[in-house]
Image: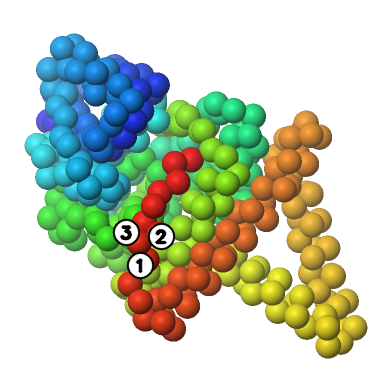
Amino acid sequence: MLISVVIPCRNEVLNIEECVNAIYNSKLKNGLSIEVILVDGLSDDGTLEVVNDLKKRYSTLIVVNNIKQVTPVAFNLGIKKAQGEFVQIIGARQIISANYLQGCIDTLNTDKDIWCVGGGVENVYQTKESEIIGLAMASSFGVGAGNFRVAKKSEFTDTVGTPMYRMNVFTKIGYFNENLVRNQDDEFNYRVTSNGGKIFLNTEITIKYFVRASVSKLFKQYMQYGYWKVYVNKLHNTITSVRQLIPLFFVIGIILGAILTFFSSIFTMLFLIGISLYCLLAIYFGVKSSSNVSKALRVMLIFPVLHWSYGYGYLKGLIHFFILKKNPSQKSKSLSRG
């Protein structure tokens, strides 16, 4: 039985060797084998030179060019090239645990209705700034309860970060939507669940993820998440998850609250109560994220960045797609690499 591992990649010279080695060092039961399809978006930092050396070591490692340099295109190129019964998607900055692939297959084999499975995330921080951002994103206050990044136990969920699918899933519901620069995995997994499939998060298997984020890139990334989430909602004519609306209400509440304070002292009081409550929650979850006072304070400052950027992007998407009835702007398609 063959497992096809698809790696979308661009300019990952520092991480790609460890990523590929971890895949081929997986502990698998007899009868299972691996092929790796690295889909490269025209890397120019030496990544391909490293990969060519790896090809001498691993005969089932192949490279496919992604001239469009778009993530869902990379997914689809790899999947269409794959020969396996199972397809595993792994980012070039993700290092899977030795039991990851076997754990995914074992989970899929427990229930035919499970179409997708993924594991827990262990962040590896490459800068002090990325550590603070990672701590905020590991908080339920930062990204919402139910997000796979904050889950502590194995459970059914609406999406996972490093998914394995049965190959026949793509026959049933199609491939990733190549028009989506962001949220392509959320949109695809929505189709999984809306067509009767289940998604399972198995926290007994893990990936290490090398985080190299910055606050400016984080703002752009989450603004795009909010913006493209509206586009996904429009595609399916539904709200795919309730928690996506909370940052929108946060942004609208700040804007309306600030305006209404000019008209009545009651509105001023309510606005200040709301701001105070938010600050108290940020303090509580910031302290909960780290026992280090300095880190906790800095995490508190990341929370409003996450919430405002996503909510602002969502509001922008509502105006763009529903009021102005436009297609996604070209500017919104430029990625931030966090």
Amino acid under disc 3: Leu
Q: Residue at x 45, y 71 (%)?
A: 317
Which quarter of the figure has residue 39?
top left
Q: Is residue 46 above or below residue 40?
A: above
Which quarter of the figure has residue 171?
bottom left
Q: Secondary structure at mark 2?
A: helix
The percent position of residue 324, horizontal first and vertical second, equals 41, 82
**Among the two numbered marks 3 and 1 on one chain, the one whose residue lies closer to the N terminus:** 3
Q: Is residue 127 left or right of residue 91?
A: right
Circle number at residue 328: 1
Circle number at residue 180: 3
Along the line of sight, the residue nearer the viewer: 45 or 167: 45
Mark 2, mark 3: which one is toward the viewer?
2
Question: What quarter of the picture does the N terminus occupy?
Answer: top left
The percent position of residue 209, horizontal first and vertical second, equals 46, 31
Q: Decide: marks 2, 1 in contact (CB < 8 A)?
A: yes
User: Which residue position holds label 2?
Assistant: 332
Q: Distance of mark 2 from mark 3, alpha carbons?
A: 10 Å
Amino acid under disc 1: Pro
